[in-house]
Structure formats: structure tokens, C-alpha cells
Image (cartoon, rainbow, N blue to C red):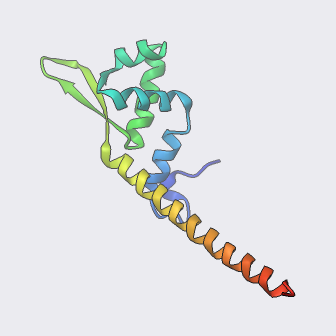
């Protein structure tokens, strides 16, 4: 059984784990791609993705719990909600990816230096 993100030992950023878990589904990624263009109503998202409203509702709930989307009530019709991306959540993901990229760059440079040093040590010239 998978532990909730907050209960996993050693996890420094549970919000990051929730965001990645929410993005772990192709339908939810498609929702995010559509919302990159502009905020949309749930009915517009369901139509664009050819999903039943109930199925889309489950995906939207996971995206909201992951902190990736938010819903705003539309003035004049409290039943309709407009879904939009949460920029701070994506900034957190981008920061994490940049840190990972920098770490891998550092590790690759260290490996290259190690490999070149080892090659020079064996080179009889």
C-alpha cells in the first residue's frame, strides 16, 4: 500500500509528491495542457477530452488536491466553476527540475574529470 505523501519518511516536500502523483495520468496531463491556453469550465474540458462529466470531475479533484488547478465560481451562476492552473505549483515543479538538472550536470562533470584522470594515468605518453 502506498503511504500518503505526508506520511512517507524522508519526504522533504509533500506538495511536490502530490503534484507529480496528479500528473501521473495522461488524462490529467491533457487537462493541464488545455488549461495552459486559458481557464475553462468543466463542461468545456469534458467536451474537449470526450469524457463523461463524472469521470472528469474525479480528475479535476485530483488536480486540485495536487495543487495544480483551482476553480473559481462564475459571477451570476454559482453552479458553474471556471478551472485554471495554479502558477505557483508549476513554479515549484520547475524549480525542482532545475535543481535536478544542475545536480546531474555537476555529477556528469565530476565523472568526466574522474574518467579523464584515469585515462591520463594509464596513458604511457
In the image, 58: left or right of 80?
A: right
Q: How many marks?
A: 0
Determine which quarter of the picture holds residue 121.
Answer: bottom right
In the image, 112: left or right of 85?
A: right
**What residue do we see at 31% from left, 22% from top?**
40
Q: Position of residue 54 (x, y in %)?
A: 45, 18
In the image, 38: left or right of 95?
A: left
**What residue do we see at 42% from left, 12% from top?**
47
Is 102 situated above or below 23?
below
**What residue do we see at 57% from left, 66% from top?**
105
Q: Nearer the viewer, residue 101 or 45?
A: 101
**What residue do we see at 49% from left, 39% from top?**
22
Look at the image and tell me in which quarter the C terminus lies: bottom right
Q: Position of residue 75 (x, y in %)?
A: 13, 21
Q: Position of residue 120 (x, y in %)?
A: 78, 83
Tell which residue pokes out farthest to the front in this image. Answer: 125
Is 103 situated above or below 33?
below
Tell which residue pokes out farthest to the left in this image. Answer: 76
Amino acid at each position: 500500500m502506498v503511504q500518503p505523501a505526508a506520511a512517507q519518511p524522508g519526504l522533504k516536500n509533500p506538495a511536490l509528491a502530490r503534484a507529480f502523483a496528479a500528473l501521473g495520468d495522461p488524462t490529467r496531463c491533457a487537462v493541464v495542457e488545455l488549461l495552459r491556453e486559458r481557464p475553462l469550465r468543466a463542461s468545456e474540458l469534458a467536451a474537449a477530452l470526450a469524457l463523461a462529466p463524472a469521470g472528469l470531475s474525479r480528475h479535476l479533484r485530483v488536480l486540485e488536491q495536487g495543487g495544480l488547478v483551482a476553480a473559481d465560481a462564475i459571477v451570476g451562476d454559482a453552479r458553474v466553476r471556471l478551472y485554471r492552473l495554479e502558477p505557483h505549483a508549476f513554479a515549484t515543479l520547475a524549480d525542482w527540475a532545475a535543481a535536478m538538472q544542475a545536480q546531474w550536470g555537476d555529477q556528469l562533470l565530476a565523472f568526466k574529470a574522474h574518467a579523464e584522470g584515469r585515462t591520463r594515468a594509464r596513458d604511457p605518453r
